[in-house]
Amino acid sequence: MNRLQAIGSIRKNLKHGGCSIGSWMQIPHPSIAEIMGQSGYDWVAIDMEHGAISVHQLPDLFRALELGDTLPLVRVARGDEKDCKQALDAGAGGIIVPMVESAKQLEKVRDVTRWPPAGKRGVAFSRANLFGKNFNEYVEEAQQPLLIAMIEHINAIEKLDNILQVKGLDAILIGPYDLSSSMGMTAKFEEQRFLDIMRTIKDRADEAKIPCGVHVVSPLIGDLQEKVDAGYRFIAYSIDSVFLNHAGARPKIT
């Protein structure tokens, strides 16, 4: 696939008020990735924070996703230079940064995801540029991979306006489980205080003209539709393992 074109397509869609829907992978098997890649998503994020996934597995997972023209992203474990460099060199089209709590933190990640002059990521032959064969074509992509900041701790709210002003930020993605946990109400998504914080995050993102997204972990279509109708525009829909648990459970029959 043409990653640069896919990145540009997602950005254009978001810029014009569209909704980008992707999904999430924690099972490191190419067959799962191939199925996910053929499922119609704009992107699929490989979860290297909570998934038991190694760097050497990324190229095969990416190849499988790309067969379906689905852009591979990586939710890195921490957002340090090594995490970002290895994911992007393997061919990720962008980075999803967990637990963003300040603009300074996000700016540091942004800089290590981009080749100079846009950033300070090391320049190298890698799978991302077919080990040098497509080096010249990759130079443009290396200036502008997707950058998604996860807002998933109550501490981020105080500095959210500054986070939203970080140059190069494409969207924010609310992690509801960690966010609710940081508020002392793990997974109590109907509590009014949690709903108020969700609304605050989205309203501030809307004011800053930054697409606000959310991870809809539930595999129920109605839950996804609810978030689309509410105006969330960068949505991670469920997880490969959750899809399997939901659809693969033995039905209750009489």
Image: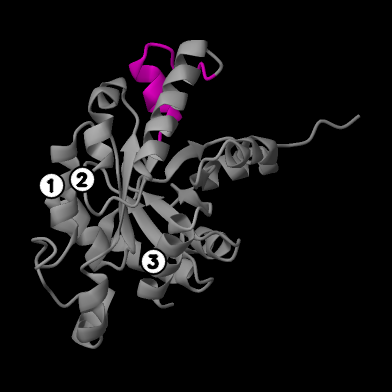
Numbered disc total: 3
- Can you tell which mark lies on residue 124? none
> Residue 131's spot in the image, x, y percent?
21, 81
Can you say whether 106 is above or below 85 in the image?
above
Judge from the rendering whether residue 192 lies leftward or rightward of residue 162; answer left or right.
right
Q: Which circle's residue, 2 or 3, is located before the other in the chain?
A: 3
User: What colouring does the structure picture have?
Assistant: one colour
Question: Which quarter of the image is occupied by the C terminus?
Answer: top right
Q: Residue placed at 46% from the left, 50% from the top?
A: 25
Q: Which residue is mark 3?
A: 7
Residue 145: which quarter of the image?
Answer: bottom left
- Which region of the structure is painted magenta? 174-189
For the residues bearing labels 2 and 1, Cβ distance under 8 angstroms: yes
- Report, in whole angstroms, how far the alpha carbon at label 3 lies from the one at label 1: 21 Å
Q: Which residue is mark 1?
A: 108
Number of other residues with Cα within 10 Å of mark 3, as a class: few under 14, some 14 to 19, many 20 or more: some
Q: Amino acid at mark 1?
A: Lys
